[in-house]
Image (cartoon, rainbow, N blue to C red):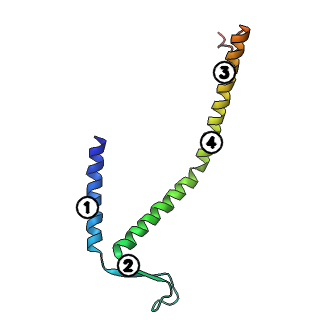
């Protein structure tokens, strides 16, 4: 079911992108020189659709980097929790080994 829904969403998007690329083939000049607009030193010429896709790709990359940076504190906390869980597992295993070796209960249960 999920695959069908994905296809129902992706096929129209792909069709729209293909139609937009075919309809916007006119070249545009992208200038990176704000001081001489009549004769720019740094400029690139290309179809409109390439400019739009490059802008979209740059936005996705910048958004991904921003999300990754914001989530850094959560990844750090998760590493800390995993380290703590690993240490606690080791402690429980050692206590069980001591209990098996000595016959005395190593871990006290809840008091009633």
First-in-chain label (1 vs 4)? 1
Quadrant of res 104? top right
Q: Nearer the viewer, mark 3 or mark 4?
A: 3
Residue at the disc numbered 2:
46
Quadrant of res 25? bottom left
> Residue 71, labelled with which disc?
none
Cβ atoms under marks 2 and 1 closer than 8 Å: no
Residue neighbourhood size for the residue with mark 1, other residues' Cα within 10 Å, grouped as few (<14), some (14–19), many (≥20) = few
Tell me the CA gap for discs 4 and 2.
46 Å
Tell me the CA gap for discs 2 and 1.
22 Å
Cβ atoms under marks 1 and 3 closer than 8 Å: no
Q: Percent x, y for residue 33? A: 51, 84
First-in-chain label (3 vs 4)? 4
Q: Percent x, y for residue 50? A: 37, 72
> Residue 15, labelled with which disc?
1
Cβ atoms under marks 3 and 4 closer than 8 Å: no
In the rendered view of the protein, which quadrant contains the N terminus? Answer: top left
Residue at the disc numbered 4:
77
In the rendered view of the protein, which quadrant contains the C terminus? Answer: top right
First-in-chain label (1 vs 3)? 1
Residue neighbourhood size for the residue with mark 4, other residues' Cα within 10 Å, grouped as few (<14), some (14–19), many (≥20) = few
Tell me the CA gap for discs 1 and 3.
58 Å
First-in-chain label (4 vs 2)? 2
Vertical order, 88 against 80 (above or below):
above
First-in-chain label (2 vs 1)? 1
Q: For the image shown, how many numbered marks are present on the structure?
A: 4
Vertical order, 93 against 103 (above or below):
below
Q: Percent x, y for residue 110? A: 65, 14
> Residue 93, labelled with which disc?
3
Q: Residue at x 70, y 20 (%)?
A: 94
């Amino acid at each position: 079911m999920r695959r069908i829904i994905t296809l129902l969403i992706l096929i129209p998007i792909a069709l729209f992108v293909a139609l937009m690329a075919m309809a916007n083939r006119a070249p545009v000049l992208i200038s990176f020189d704000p001081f001489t607009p009549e004769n720019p030193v740094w400029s690139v010429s290309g179809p409109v659709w390439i400019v739009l896709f490059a802008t979209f790709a740059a936005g996705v990359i910048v958004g991904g980097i921003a999300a990754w940076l914001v989530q850094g504190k959560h990844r750090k906390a998760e590493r800390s929790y995993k380290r703590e869980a690993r240490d606690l597992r080791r402690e429980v295993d050692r206590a069980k080994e001591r209990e098996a070796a000595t016959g005395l209960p190593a871990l006290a249960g809840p008091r009633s």
